[in-house]
Image (cartoon, rainbow, N blue to C red):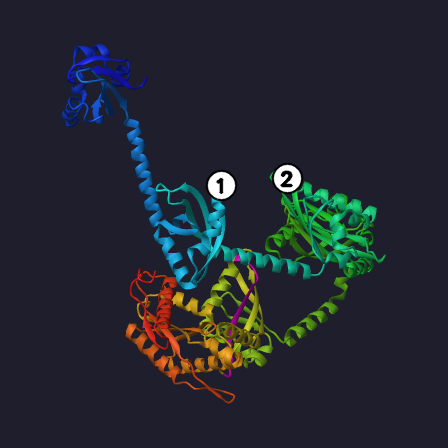
Amino acid sequence: MADVLFTLSADGQRLIAMNAAAERLLGYTVRDFLKQPELWLSLVITADRQRLSDFRASMGRVERTTYRMRDRSGQLLLLEECLWSSGVGHPLCGRVTDITQRDKANEQEQQLARAYRLMMVRSRDPMAILLLKDESLVISHANPAWHLYHDAACAHSRLSLEHLYLPHVLRSLERAEPWQCDISLSLPRGESRLSVQMVSLGRSLADEGRQVAVMARDITQVHQRLEHVIDQQQRLARRVDETPGAHYATAGEWPPEELEYLSAGSEALTGLSHDLLMASPGLWQARLAPDELTICQQRFDEAVRERHSRLSLCYAFVHVDGRKRYLQDDMQLSYSPAGEVTAVLGKLSDVTQREAHRRQLDNLVQQMRGVVFQCRLSQEGELRYTYLSPVASQVLGLDPQAVIDDPMLLLARIAGREREQLLMSLQTSAQQQSPWEAEIRYQHPDGQERRLACVGLPQVIDSPEGGVIWNGYCDDATARYRIEDELRQSEERYRFILNSVSDLVSIEDSHGICQYISPSVEKLCGYRPQEIIGQEIKQLIHPDDMLRIAQEVHRAACLGEVFRIDFRIQHKAGHTLWFESISTPSMDPVTGRYQRVLSVSRNIHERKLVEQRREHEAMTDAMTGAMTRASFLDTLDTLLSSSSREQMALILFDIDHFKRVNDTHGHAAGDQVLISLGEACRAQLRRDDCFARLGGEEFAVLLTDAGTATGVGMAERLRQQIAALEVRFKSLTLRCTISMGVATPLPGETRDGYLHRADMALYSAKRSGRDRVVLASQSLSEDN
């Protein structure tokens, strides 16, 4: 037994008997207590010792008491002692219980309860305990956030607490687990959506009714974003259905045995209904030629083994109408960490016409005099041929397939030094992504030496193996040296084309000196070529663009890459024109610095004017001529983040009873009122002030270099001018008034807080009777 039982004399001063629990509790044996009657009281702390003596002496008047005492190890214990007697003059029986842990648990529970109450009071989420009494709800406890939301909602929408919560409270009481629901509140600032969780607490202590704990969270923004995402998904699905071809998704296999998604365009592409293909994807596979299906499966398996993320297949498909069509299947493959295909996203396109053109191209390649080739240079520097047109057997004297299998059959017939130069030129082309050109001395199998002229365009391979491929053309140029005259004529024709081109072609050295400029400069810029060549090219460029162009030239020259830039050129007549230039720096392989820059520039002045006009239209409300909401908010953010934020004032206003104008005279009359109001405001405001239409009949004015007095004065002048404004619409004369709120920014105030204070001032003006100006409070807490 854990409790200590003992017997005292009738006067409570002498210990008669005690059980062994005392030794377990205090560390002293029963013999110690019997030999030393004062031992028990000596262990009690001094502050409680007299109270214990009085308690034992007052038996019959007090039944129990608590006191503190130390055990043999010095640990402080809290004990509860009870005494009772069977009669007057009889010994006293007692029981001592260790309540140390129970007291600590009670203290922890109290601390936890205080923490919960503090958390509830400070929480931004509405929390309350509702009491259900006779089909009516009473708030038993609620935090400030609850009153902030629900008091405003009940006052604004005139809805009672029972209307909002009673059905949900009844459902939560019927269930053992918590009840979750969403509730919409109509607040002055707009609709708010709350996610509410209710937990039944049983009946109240006073048995006044059943209690329910209500915890809510404002999910308005989350709900809006969710609706936006759903809307985007729906629009994306519609766009996918509207795009040519068909899109599909499978769980990872091809041909698909089960489709997870198939767009509506599949019916027009295959002739099979969408539902039929979803139910039986095998019909797709059945309309492919067996040999082509096998090849496609092999290519798919190879792509999976090499972990390619993209794959493009082209195969013949028999349409329901019996005609053969060629489909291109562009796939995007997703893999698991283990390397298994988890999903295949594909797009089917009808390439029947393109396939016909490809076949014509194959026929043309076979008829070409030179060799069309494709070669690949691996990251290790190994060169292999992946394609040679059939004419290679005539030009090279070698079987094309044999060269594909063993490229040394071709490379061995090139002199060793030229073979090394060939590989170096390919590596340079790969690094710079520039066209590759080479002239090769080739020992033909017939014993004659021939000169081969090769050209190719590099393309980086998007695969784990990497490398670069060239698609090119190789021709027998042996006879070229016999036709130098024709080459000179060709060069003259080239110069003629260059001099006749309408674009501006120029070459400048690393110091910015013009080395060449095409004759078109006279037509485009008014200068003769002789006035520019030998001079700094920057004399043509607008001063504001010089630094930007110099930086771009330096950057591109360091990287050795082609760059595009827009800039302004000063015409000799004095006006400015916009040009777009594509420039290529030429690098010195020895020094690594650029030697010259070749630029081809085109007049884009008309396009720039159109772009500037469209940009202005995007930032301006078409009806009132005011700034758009997005443009105004960007300007407000800029000013609030600048050092001049203290010298600005914000005016928010809207037209009083504007809906009556639309309902009574029609929207055309309302539009005329908005147009007239915009003209009146722009005429009254200063040049640097910002006037914006935030939406509907709500407007804003942002005054720079202005304080509170200036802002209120300007607002009052605008109010008076609008009140005196007469709007002519057909045979009617319309008038309107506006309610205005004025605010200046507070230190550290955010944009939303600034707008909110001005908005609250506007609402105050409306509540005070409209057609007036109200200054916002200068405290953040007063508007919250």
Element type where label 2 sits in the image: loop
Residue found at the far front of this picture: 87
Q: Position of residue 429 (x, y in %)?
A: 63, 54
- Answer with left or right where residue 623 lies relative to residue 262: left
- Type of amino acid at the residue the image marks with label 1: Glu
> Over which residues does the magenta segment extend?
559-573
Q: Quadrant of residue 49?
A: top left
Dot 1: within a 10 Å radius of its alpha carbon, few (fewer than 14), some, or many (20 or more) residues? Answer: few
- Answer with left or right where residue 221 lies relative to residue 310: left
Q: Give the label, 2 or 1, closer to the camera.
A: 1
User: Which residue is located at x 46 percent, y 76 percent?
Assistant: 658
Q: Position of residue 683 (x, y in %)?
A: 40, 83
- On screen, 567 above or below 572? above
- On screen, 166 above or below 541? above
Please say whether residue 409 is visible from this viewpoint: no
Per the image, the residue denoted by label 2 is 339
> Where is the N terminus found, in terms of image quarters?
top left
- Which sits in the foreground, 722 or 256? 722
- On screen, 617 above or below 56? below
- The mark found on residue 265 in the picture is none
- Answer with left or right where residue 471 lies relative to residue 743: right
> Where is the C terminus found, in terms of image quarters?
bottom left
Q: Quadrant of residue 521?
A: bottom right
Per the image, the residue denoted by label 1 is 177
